[in-house]
Amino acid sequence: MSTLACQTDLQQEQMIETISALQDQLERSQRMAMIGELSSTTTHEFNNLLTTIINYARMGLRHKDEATRDKALLRINDAATRAAKVAGSVMSMTRTGGRFEPISMKQIAEDTLLLMEREFRKYGVLLESSLSEVPNVIGNACDLQRVLLNLLVNARQATAKGGSVRLSLQLDNGTNEVIFSVRDTGTGIPADVLPNIFKPFFSTKSGPDASGKGGSGVGLASCKTTIDAHGGRIRVESTVGKGTAFIIRLPSSTSTAAMAANN
């Protein structure tokens, strides 16, 4: 091999490494921006939960009868449990890596909805869900939660005030795959754009919106990379003016594909 050819190969390797490093940096920046936004929107949730805890604690201290104190303790426990879930969901977004293990997609969906409820209310978009009991999947819970968060954020951004977004979870008994989908009633994606949406750095947005989210062209590419790593598939259906649906299929923990992804 000539010296020129060796130099060209070296330059290509360095370029690939640089692009990979930049993509990782963009993904981290996007994740931290989302964490910052969610932290601000969940502050009110924590305040409400703390108010509930304080009020019922005071009620329990004022009333000596056992029934009232039991009611107060139950309400305190419920509020504290919800607060712990909110905090845990936010903290999980900062984690990277981790091994694949059996996880509940229904639990991930419920935790993600808990994080996003207030933001959807803030922008006047109805957030609905239909979550069936499904088998576990083999995967990384933090990575899959970030996929759901990305899809929900995109759906919220594409949907005008008064519109709706629906998160669904079900089992395909024929293929033994766990299916979750995010459907919105937003602007839709033009047919000529659809083939490009999973390409790195491709974006139809001019930049982040008022919440600081979106516009880097990394979110959907990262989602596809994550789903591919889990042995799954992601596809999109969209009609301009009517809305968009992202449908993800993941092999359940008992399927051959799930076992292969774990090895």
Image (cartoon, helix red, strand yellow):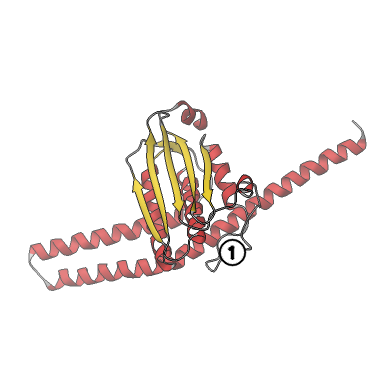
Left or right of 103 on screen, residue 11: right
Q: Mark 1 points at which residue?
A: 208
The relative height of residue 184 versus residue 106 in the rendered view (above or below) is below
Residue that appears at 57% across and 58% down? 30
Residue density around tag 1, few if under 14, some if 14–19, many if 20 or more, within 10 Å: some
Q: The disc labelled 1 sits on which kind of residue?
A: Pro
- Tell me if residue 104 can be seen: no
The front one of 257 and 51 is 257
At numbered mark 1, what does the secondary structure look like: helix, strand or loop? Answer: loop
Residue drawn 30% across the image and 66% down it: 49
Between residues 152 and 69, which one lies in front from this camera angle? 152
Q: Quadrant of the N terminus?
A: top right
Residue in front for this viewpoint, 3 or 130: 130
Q: Is residue 263 left or right of residue 174?
A: right
Q: Position of residue 67 (x, y in %)?
A: 9, 62
Question: In which quadrant of the rendered view does residue 72 lie?
Answer: bottom left
Where residue 144 appears, as percent x and y from the top left, is 48, 45
Q: Does residue 212 appear anywhere in the picture?
A: yes
Of 46 and 125, the residue lying toward us:
125
Determine which quarter of the picture holds residue 102: top left
